[in-house]
Image: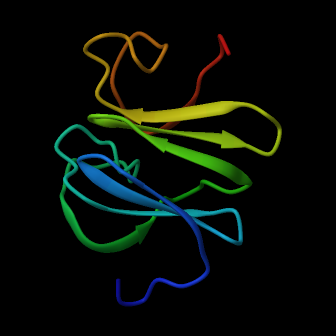
């Protein structure tokens, strides 16, 4: 992917998210349910840094959602939530800390 460096891990689903060595996340691909976490439902064809997301140590991509584990051991998720997979009442367009974990 042009413009993407310092990749520690990649996670693939309907979108792709890269955990970077600086603790940030860049995502691209289908974003119809907000899984990219950039606050939109606009598909991205180049790696886009998820705004406001730092201190990430792990990333996981589901069917139409993405979750990250942060350095403080909290979990934040974005995307589709039709089956309650995010652990909060509604879908999220930006990573939201899940209070029940």
Quarter holding residue 54: bottom right
Residue at 66% from the left image edge and 39% from the top image edge: 69
In the rendered view, does 34 fall on the left or right side of 76? left
Q: Nearer the viewer, residue 45 or 12?
A: 12
Specify the quadrant that holds the N terminus: bottom left
Quarter holding residue 78: top left
Quarter holding residue 81: top left
* Residue 28 picture location, percent across and down: 31, 64
* Residue 63 picture location, percent across and down: 27, 34
* Residue 14 picture location, percent across and down: 23, 47
Q: Residue furthest right?
A: 72
Q: Is residue 5 above or below residue 67?
A: below
Residue at 64% from the left image edge and 47% from the top image edge: 58
Residue at 60% from the left image edge and 54% from the top image edge: 53
Q: Is residue 81 above or below residue 13?
A: above
Specify the quadrant that holds the C terminus: top right
In the rendered view, does 49 fall on the left or right side of 63? right
Q: How many numbered discs?
A: 0
* Residue 19 picture location, percent across and down: 57, 62
Q: Is residue 20 above or below residue 79?
A: below
In the rendered view, does 31 fall on the left or right side of 7? left
In the rendered view, does 40 fall on the left or right side of 72? left
Rendering colour mode: rainbow
């Amino acid at each position: 992917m042009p413009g993407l460096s310092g990749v520690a891990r990649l996670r693939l689903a309907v979108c792709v998210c890269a955990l970077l060595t600086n603790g940030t996340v860049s995502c691209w691909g289908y974003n119809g349910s907000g899984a990219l976490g950039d606050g939109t439902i606009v598909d991205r064809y180049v790696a886009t840094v998820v705004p406001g997301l730092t201190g990430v140590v792990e990333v996981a991509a589901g069917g139409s959602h993405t979750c990250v584990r942060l350095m403080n051991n909290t979990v934040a998720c974005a995307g589709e939530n039709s089956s309650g997979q995010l652990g909060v009442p509604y879908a999220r367009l930006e990573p939201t800390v899940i209070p029940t974990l």
